Amino acid sequence: MSSTPSSPHPTDPQPTEAQPAEARGGRPSPQEEIERLQARVAELEELRRRALADLDNLRKRVARDLGAERERERARIAARWLPILDDLERALEHAAANPQDIIEGVRTVRDRAVAMLADLGYPRRDDLGVPFDPARHEAVGVRTDTDAPAGTIVEVHQPGYGDAEHQLRPAMVSVAAKAED
């Protein structure tokens, strides 16, 4: 028997470019690599579209929930004002009565409104006699006809509401100043 190089058997699969790289036992062809990368790009694009759709749905849900919460909070605050409105109605019903009773009724309504604002985190500040603080006060006047130290609040024209961190409105005040000689 002579030794001749063995030729492949006709039934043995021959590696060709049409076969997957694994069947050829080597690296993928450029066309296979392109197709694999295109498939991966399509897969990532689909994931991106889904993520964007999920994000859009989340934005819509948050906006809807925020709107509903805002409406509930508005209703809650409005409901807290109803007793004050009722007190005003009663005061008006007694307008022909004793004026002193009307004054006392209005004072009671005001006290209730101030208490409600304090419960909401905005206490009333009548800062008479304290040093002027531009973060809490708005100076609308200067007074030199007082014995108070310069920079001290000598008159409150409109009280402030709130605290240092959550101010609803600053107090409108007049501040003492030294008289110029």
Image (cartoon, rainbow, N blue to C red):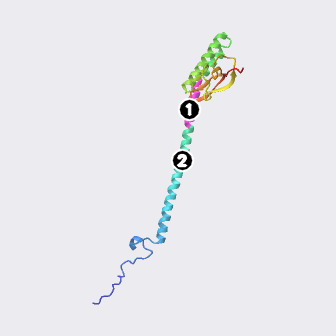
Q: Is residue 41 above or below residue 118?
A: below
Q: Which residue is mark 2?
A: 57
Q: Residue furthest front?
A: 181
| Image quadrant in which the C terminus is located | top right
**Residue 31 image offset from top left, x and y in percent:** 48, 71
Q: Residue at x 60, y 23 (%)?
A: 131
Q: Is residue 52 above or below residue 126?
A: below
Give the magenta-colored segment's residue range. Answer: 68-82
Check residue 73 in the rendering and tell me which mark sits there, or answer none.
1
Q: Is residue 83 visible?
A: no
**Residue 164 image offset from top left, x and y in percent:** 56, 29
Q: Residue at x 63, y 11 (%)?
A: 101
Query: What's the magenta bit mostly, secondary-structure-wise?
Result: helix
Mark 2: amino acid? Asn
Q: Nearer the viewer, residue 79 or 180?
A: 180
Mark 1: amino acid? Glu
Exactly how many numbered labels are in the figure?
2
Q: Is residue 138 visible?
A: yes
**Residue 97 image offset from top left, x and y in percent:** 66, 10
- Upstream in sequence: badge 2 or badge 1: 2
CB atoms of marks 2 and 1 within 8 Å: no
Disc 1, SS: helix
Q: Left or right: where does residue 87 sit relative to residue 34?
A: right
State how far apart marks 2 and 1 are (Cα). Answer: 24 Å
